[in-house]
Image (cartoon, coloured by chain):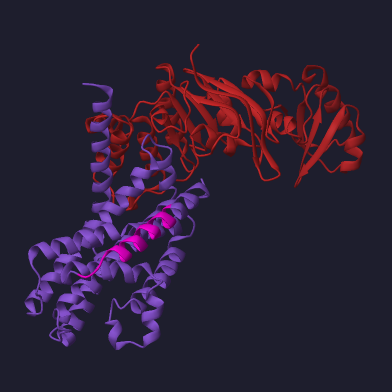
Chain colours: A red, B purple
Amino acid sequence: MTKVLEVAGVEHRFGDTVALDDLALDVAAGECVALLGPNGAGKTTLVNLAVGMLVRQRGTVLVGGADPRWASTRRQLGVVQQTLGFPKVLTVRELITGAAVRGGKPRSSAAPIMAELDLTKLADRRARKLSGGQQQRVQLAMALVAEPRLLILDEPTVGLDMPARRKFWEIIARRRAAGVGVLVTTHLIEETAAVADRVVVLNHGRVVTSGSPTELVARFPDRTVLARTAVPERRLAELPGVLSVRREDALVRLATREPEELLRVLLAEDPALSGLRVEGTGLAEAVLAFTGGSARPNAEVRA
Amino acid sequence: MSTAVLQRVSLGRVLRAEIADELRGIVREPTALFFSILMPVGFFALFVSIFGDLTDGTMPAGTRMVATFGTFGVLAATMLNPGIGIAQDREIGWLRAKRVSAVPVLITLLCKVVAALCYAIAMLVAMAVTAGLTGSLEATAGQLLRLAVVLLLGAAPFALLGIAIGLQAGSNATAAILNAVLMPSAVVSGLWMPLEILPDFFGHIAQFLPTYHLSQLAIAQLDGGPVLGHALVMLGSTAALAAAAALSYRHARP
């Protein structure tokens, strides 16, 4: 399948700090790749290289087969930033037609995209009068109006309510169906699980692991037992099969690979136990584990 | 139609769109006109009404002031407007949005300067009309046109300085820094009051300031004075500040 983003052997340093270390990543046409990892993992540096904001030090970064430092290459690129302020005097229509012109499209291409994003009624409203959610929709319209081959979304749904998020991802899904590749960075990991074909986990500038959200979660056979109990943490840690204990106010979270056995022992220890619940590992816990957090991946699978 | 022609057409559309956006800012935020046009023209009117009829034997002071105050006004517009505008755009993330678009950021910066030149032209016209109304303007249309062209071209190094600062500092800091550079330079270079009525050391310091040399180039369009030395200083200043702006751009935060 055609690759719309190719990153290979990329190394990038800021002084003595290694931001990216021999990094490789690609996004195929129509694919949605989520870039996850803790702060400082290298996500922003990678995005800045992909949008042509940083000068490449070593390795290859290609958008649609060309260097994103070239303005003509960036015609293939649509970018949604986490926070973007607009010049407050410009109207929604002017912002979107401006983006169309900058992307080499006719001014008339703004109307259909405004309709798709429910912005037609706001067309003559100035940017200063837009709510946060409306601004985010305008930004998406600006990213889409030039019909890019690659969308780079940096925390794109921050500030959007649930219906707006759903609508956002529906629009992205339509573009993907038309062959647009998507690279998304977000801290809303469970949202990512629902939309991404592939998750790439970064830490210390390297790809720690990658795979579909289901594959990553499947590498963690752990279950979490949640309960309200008066049993001290120290005693809980000694119970058979307990891998870790975390207390959140009255609630304790016990990681285990043998939930049934643990439940039996737990009920014997504390007959007044309440709020009992068993959860599987989510993508958030899996990512946390891969980047050195508290959960632990299955060693055999990880190897 | 060849690709090259297509690209030219596209560039023309982009330039029009970018300049239109900048000018919309002027029209829709008229308070900016106060600082960029009304204040310099107001001061000009005040000084012309007081000193306009005095003469140094070559021309009335009111005519000379079109060159000197005109220099100040053009520099205020072309240095402050793009500089502060770039800093504001950078603060809100708009400059980044432009930088990741398919338009070279140089075009964006150029359009900010071109829009500022529109202010500058309006201000020069207002000053010439004011001088004319007070009866102290003795210059042909050709002389005034040459004066305007010299000032608009000579504004380049100052616009580059504004860009260099705007790419690094916040908008408030940019305004403060650029005003701190412009105001003393304007006074010492004799843009507000003739150097002849100021202490001698002002004249010595002025020799080192591009603001002085630009004003002398402007005056030369009216009295036919020498231009070469002043032009060389302006070319050197442009080269140095272009390098500074390029360096600032290279080190600007993404």
Q: Is residue A270 left or right of residue A276?
A: right
x, y (%) of residue B169? 48, 59
Q: Is residue B234 magenta?
A: yes
Which of the 4 image quadrants contains residue A93? top left
Task: Please give the name of the residue rendered at 34% of the width and 74% of the height, measured from the top-left corner.
Answer: B186
Is residue B249 shown left or right of residue B46?
Answer: right
Provide residue B196's location: percent of width, then percent of height: 28, 85
Position of B20 with respect to B104 (left or right) is left
Q: Is residue B153 above or below residue A10?
A: below
* Total number of numbered discs in the rendering: 0
Say which residue appears at 31% left-offset and 52% top-offset. Answer: B112
In which image quadrant can residue B124 be found?
A: bottom left
Determine if residue A187 is in view: no
Quadrant of image for the C terminus of chain A: top right
Magenta-drawn stretch, dominant element (helix, strand or loop): helix
Q: Can residue A73 be seen in the rendering of this structure?
A: yes
Q: Is residue A207 magenta?
A: no
Q: Is residue B224 left or right of residue A159?
A: left
Residue A279 on image: x %, y %: 71, 28
Q: Is residue A14 above or below residue A33?
A: below
Instruction: Please report the residue visible at 32 percent of the width from the left and 68 percent of the height from the top.
Output: B213
The residue segment tinted magenta is B225-242
Q: Nearer the viewer, residue A176 or B57?
A: B57
Give the residue at x 81% y 24%. A259
* Of residues B175 and A33, the one drawn nearer to the viewer in this rendering: B175
Direction top: furthest residue: A1
Rendering quarter of residue B184? bottom left
Seen from the viewer's position, the closer of residues B215 and A96 is B215
Asked if residue A150 is positioned above or below residue A155 in the image, the reply reads above
Residue B102 x/y as whole percent: 37, 34
Q: Is residue A127 above or below residue B229?
A: above
